[in-house]
Image (spheres, rainbow, N blue to C red):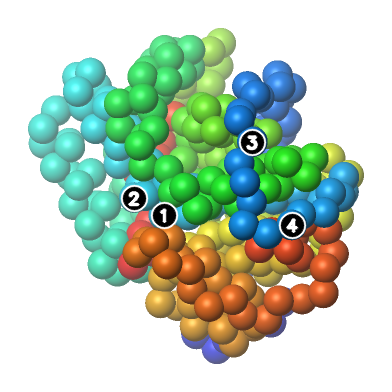
Amino acid sequence: MAALGWFTRRRRPATERSVLAGEASAEAARKSSAEPPAPQPPAEPEFPVVGDERAAAFFDLDNTVMQGAALFHFGRGLYKRHFFRKRELARFAWQQTWFRMAGVEDPAHMEDVRSSALSIVKGHRVSELMSIGEEIYDEYMADRIWPGTRALAQAHLDAGQRVWLVTAAPVETATIIARRLGLTGALGTVAESVGGIYTGRLVGEPLHGPAKAEAVRALATAEGLDLARCAAYSDSANDIPMLSIVGHPYAVNPDTRLRRHAREQGWRLRDYRTGRKAAKIGIPAAAGVGAVAGGTAAAVALHRRRR
């Protein structure tokens, strides 16, 4: 994988826990996508598309598909339902701000965040959080989907390809969002449950950084996809490992570091934050649609920020 010096120095390589998290997320995603998505009205793509059954598209969630952090809104919904107190809400807000400003993860800080969030759902039923998640989507998330990115996802769907969300959000939350958008499914952080009740532990680690790439690899192997013909979309430099393993990476609403890296690598950019499109860079020869298409509240925790 080609990388700039700054990324090489900071990059956290895939570990055994990353691989475990990725494989667990891929397995959960395959199970959740067994039920076909609800039909969606066709969207008019901004470009022609070409079908390819061995190609698929992988979309990061926060600031790529949805404006802001899905898990911040999920946390708001849990607070409204008295899952935790004001003091804990303030703590999560501070942790969110810290990640947004720092842009990188401190291991000790991340462990503290993760432990805090997992303690909230420990002892709750998975089915309970799924039901609440449906309500929270309607309350806080439905109106925050970027129309431009949604059109990109729909172009892949219209070409007969599968489309997956890939996020550090809990896989249950991510699956709800994917289903509401008519996508194939979602890869997300897997929180351990026994008998349908959360234990307060994760399977592996948060689906973040190298773990996202491992999840995509595992899913591609299981589904018979050719990653060289697949596309991936993200706003964050943290997702360079995932973007680097597909043939058609896109930087969508990119942060400064990802924009710089995308320009260096000749990746294409899209920016929907101001209603304008960023310049298209390095468009490769057509190779399927990618070439032309351009665990539950564990997460309130895990959201690292990209600005």
Can you identify the residue that label 4 sits on? 48
Residue at 14 percent across and 42 percent down: it is 90
In terms of secondary structure, where does tag 2 sit?
Answer: loop
Asked whether 209 or 232 is in front, the reply is: 232
Can you identify the residue that label 3 sits on? 42
Can you identify the residue that label 1 sits on? 63
Q: Position of residue 161 (x, y in %)?
A: 77, 43
The residues tagged by marks 2 and 1 sit, at their Cα atoms, a distance apart of 5 Å
Foreground disc of the pair 1, 4: 4
Q: Position of residue 96 (x, y in %)?
A: 26, 52
The residues tagged by marks 4 and 2 sit, at their Cα atoms, a distance apart of 29 Å
In terms of secondary structure, where does tag 3 sit?
Answer: loop
Q: Is residue 278 left or right of residue 144?
A: right
Mark before the other along the chain sequence, 3 or 1:
3
Residue flagged by tag 3: what amino acid is it? Pro
Please rate how many residues cluster around mark 4, counting C-alpha atoms within 10 Å: few if below 14, some from 14 to 19, many from 20. Answer: few
Q: Position of residue 55 (x, y in %)?
A: 81, 51
